[in-house]
Amino acid sequence: MRAHLGDHLVIESPATGATGRDGEIVGLRHEDGTPPYDVRWSDTHEVTLVFPGPDAHVRPHGHEPNPGDIGRRVAAERDRRGLSREETARRARMAPDYLAYLEEHPGDPSQATLVRLAGALGTSVQALRGGGADLPPGRGAALLHPELHDLAPQECLTLLSTHGVGRVAVTTSGGPAVIPVNYEVVDGAIAFRTAPGSAPAAAVGSEVAFEVDHVDETMSRGWSVLAVGPAREVTEPDEARRLTEGAHTEPWAGGERGMWVSVRPLRLTGRRITPAGH
């Protein structure tokens, strides 16, 4: 642990994982910034000499709150499962304030905290830590008695909406290609941004397939939706501007991608894998 004058020392409560105490570091005993520190506590304004334990971490001076990788994954998984912070905290047996802090600030929660969070969210500690991020999904064991269900068009539309990452299948000069793209669903049509001359732009003027899916690694469940329909370039300025202003995210691939392509589904099908009897 290293700190500078003006940094804050935050100590978590060992019982709940919530912030138990914090204070400003007003004195260093070693030139390299290692402990111990003179800390002026926020609650009493008293200055004491502190030897930080494993439940303490340093928040740099002037550091604006922003989520760390674990916090982002916790918030995303909670949102995907439709859970409030209060409900998630209750399931994980922790203070809602600490969960809010974890989702909004960089942090390194204890293994016990991650185990409780993973259980509350129906996922794994490895997934919350980002393990397997470079591996393809679906490497876990199959369900003992899986069932494959066809999805009704309305359920397909619900799963497809409103935005995310999908795959568009097109025919290019080099042959068939399947490209992941960030997409939006607006007025029943799938829209994605690309660059003129790129592989996704080859969709314009032809019938294409667009697929989205989700794999629940922990529960060995999943679903997929396939939309098939004609693709066109959005050339009307007001329509393109409305798509740009309403987009939930910039294209992950970066670069200049000002060309909008719209796919109007004529066929919408999907399937879901569940345990037998569900």
Image: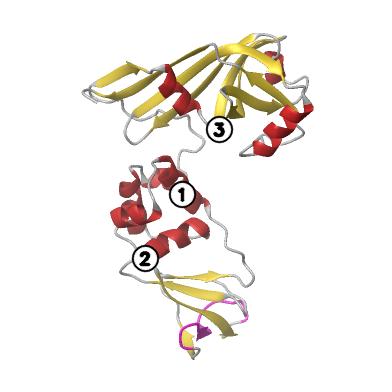
- Residue at position x 59%, y 75% from top? 7
- Residue at position x 35%, y 42% from top? 123
Residue 6 is situated, as x and y percent measured from the top left of the image, at: 62, 79
Observer able to see residue 108: no
Q: Pointer 3: what residue?
A: 163
Label 3 vs label 2, nearer the camera: 3
- Residue at position x 33%, y 61% from top? 94
Q: Could you give the CA–CA distance between mark 1 and mark 3, rounded to whole angstroms?
A: 17 Å
Q: Nearer the viewer, residue 152 or 105?
A: 152
Q: Residues within 10 Å of mark 1 (few under 14, many from 20)?
A: many
User: On residue 75, which mark appears?
Assistant: 1
Q: Residues within 10 Å of mark 2 (few under 14, many from 20)?
A: many
**For the magenta stretch, what is the residue range?**
31-44
Q: Quadrant of the C terminus?
A: top left
Q: Nearer the viewer, residue 139 or 41?
A: 41
User: On residue 170, which mark appears?
Assistant: none
Q: Amino acid at mark 3?
A: His
Q: Is residue 179 left or right of residue 146?
A: right
Q: Is residue 139 left or right of residue 173?
A: left
Residue 200 is situated, as x and y percent measured from the top left of the image, at: 68, 20
Q: Pointer 2: what residue?
A: 17
